Amino acid sequence: MEKKLKLVEETTAMLIADRIAGLDKEVFSENPIKKIIILRMQPPSEAKRIAYIPEEEAVSNEPEHYVIHNYGLKKIIDQECRKRVILLSESERSKDFIKMTLEEVFIGIAAHEVRHRVQHLLPIEWFSPEHARTIDDPYFRRLIEFRRIIFTSHPPEGNYQREFDAKVIENLVVEKWHYGEKSHSRIAELIKLEPKHLAKAEE
């Protein structure tokens, strides 16, 4: 049983690593990540189970990399797949709740972590709760307000602004993927999205 679980978790980690590498290469075509480390151990915290590690935060002179701690990973992924996710694009009060597929979970994780690398390396503006008042697109206003409500009741570990921004992108990518936007080039555009691309025109 233990051997089977270990194999499942190792395979799951490799599948996630593959999704991260694919999106990272699409976003950073001239500077793709060179290393994704998979560790057979518990993470320091769940927030660090799967993470982007900048070079200045790496240990033992490692270059920047992504890390995946696969011990206990199956339980976490199973929990994600059992969650009901609200779809925000159909109406002001969406009644659509879906169970995420395994691939949607993987692509959401990958988009989230690659967005963290974007935050670190590119001079972009991050999404924040305040952008619900400055963005014209009603879908994005709902998405940002929804994420604000979730973070109010369940604050994230780590940097609030960094995680808020990455979660907005993660939610966006999962929903677009669910509705059929599965081109890696399109997903890469979403991962690099900035609030100014959606800002209200000045009157």
Image (cartoon, rainbow, N blue to C red):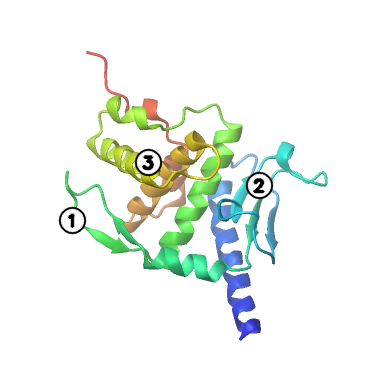
Q: Dot 2: what SS?
A: loop
The location of residue 187, given as percent across then percent down, is: 43, 47
Residue at horizontal 75%, vertical 44%? 63
Residue at horizontal 45%, vertical 38%? 165
The amino acid beneath tag 3 is Thr
Q: Nearer the viewer, mark 2 or mark 1?
A: 1
> Distance from label 2 to label 3 (Cα)?
33 Å
- Which mark, by number, is residue 152? 3
Q: Dot 3: what SS?
A: helix
Q: Nearer the viewer, mark 3 or mark 1?
A: 3
Q: Is residue 10 left or right of residue 100?
A: right
Look at mark 1 in the image and give the residue it sits on.
Answer: 95
**Camera sees residue 136:** yes
How many numbered marks are there?
3
**Camera sees residue 181:** no
The amino acid beneath tag 2 is Ile
Q: Quadrant of the N terminus?
A: bottom right
